[in-house]
Amino acid sequence: MKILFAEDDKDISKAVVTLLEKNSYTVEAVYNGEDALDYATCGEYDAIVMDIMMPKLDGVTALQEMRKAGVNTPVLLLTAKTEVEDRIEGLDAGADDYLTKPFAGGELLARLRAMLRRKGDYQSDVLTFRDLSLDRGSYTLTCGEKSVKLVGKAYQLMEMLIRSPHQIMSVNQLMEHIWGWDSEAEINVVWVNVSFLRKKLTEIGSSVEIHATRGVGYSLE
């Protein structure tokens, strides 16, 4: 699942992004309200986690503009404010949930999972293609009676491929959506993870393959 995370404090942002990625979420991070609004209106996300106190545009105003633009993605607001009036303002602006700083990582993950379950257009936790299924709750890839648990980038790559079978995705697309353009990762990490997934598909006996189109990209066939 893909999360947009908006937080101007770089230390907090880095910590939360690491937490989310370790739990197999794909994350795009921005550091001000204007960018949060731009990304939310132009991109596709399963959820948005956004701080209220941000430069250029505060989180509540950014959220209001998102809703006016027709963005119905679930939003979890983060804030250091504890007054009831502030929470009411955020919820009235269109937030789905509210979490006060400082917060425990486990609570953030739990609230995110709960918010996604409540999502109006919530998708099944299990993605399928041919004889293959990917359980997004347990991160398990299954074929028949055999299964393997995927973690980190390998899971995110398989999720991206299985959500759009037959669609060729370029290495640049995969790098942008999974590792992010600001990542220091080398482009060969895509090949390394593709090779790993191919081995796992063979181990569980799936007829599905990750096909490479030379000079173009990868697709699930």
Image (spheres, rainbow, N blue to C red):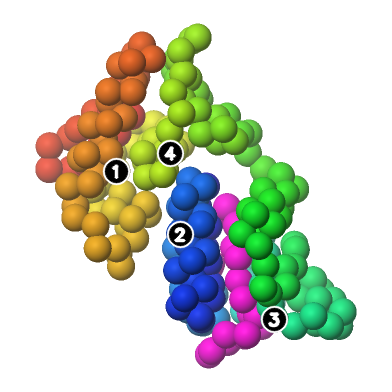
Q: Earlier in the sequence, mark 1 or mark 4?
A: 4
Question: Is 212 located above or below residue 190 in the figure?
Answer: above
Q: Which residue is mark 2?
A: 18
Q: Position of residue 149 (x, y in %)?
A: 46, 28
The residue under label 3 is which amino acid type? Ala
Q: Secondary structure at mark 3?
A: loop
* Residue that appears at 45% across and 69% down: 14
Q: Nearer the viewer, mark 1 or mark 4?
A: 4
Q: Which residue is mark 4?
A: 151
Q: Which residue is mark 3?
A: 80
Verify CB contact (< 8 Å) between mark 2 and mark 4.
no
Mark 3 is surrounded, within 10 Å at the Cα level, by few (under 14), some (14 to 19) or many (20 or more) other residues, namely few
> Extreme left residue here?
215
* Residue that appears at 51% across and 55% down: 20
Cα distance between the residues tagged 1 and 3: 40 Å
Verify CB contact (< 8 Å) between mark 1 and mark 4.
no
Q: Position of residue 131 (x, y in %)?
A: 45, 15
Q: Earlier in the sequence, mark 3 or mark 4?
A: 3
Mark 1 is surrounded, within 10 Å at the Cα level, by few (under 14), some (14 to 19) or many (20 or more) other residues, namely some
Mark 2 is surrounded, within 10 Å at the Cα level, by few (under 14), some (14 to 19) or many (20 or more) other residues, namely some
Q: Which residue is mark 1?
A: 169
56 inside magenta stretch: yes
Q: Secondary structure at mark 4?
A: loop
Q: Position of residue 31 (x, y in %)?
A: 47, 78
Q: Secondary structure at mark 2?
A: helix
Q: Earlier in the sequence, mark 1 or mark 2?
A: 2
Q: Which residues are magenta?
A: 38-61
Question: Is 102 located above or below residue 45 in the figure?
Answer: below
Question: Is 67 located above or below residue 164 in the figure?
Answer: below
* Residue that appears at 52% across and 73% down: 12
47 inside magenta stretch: yes
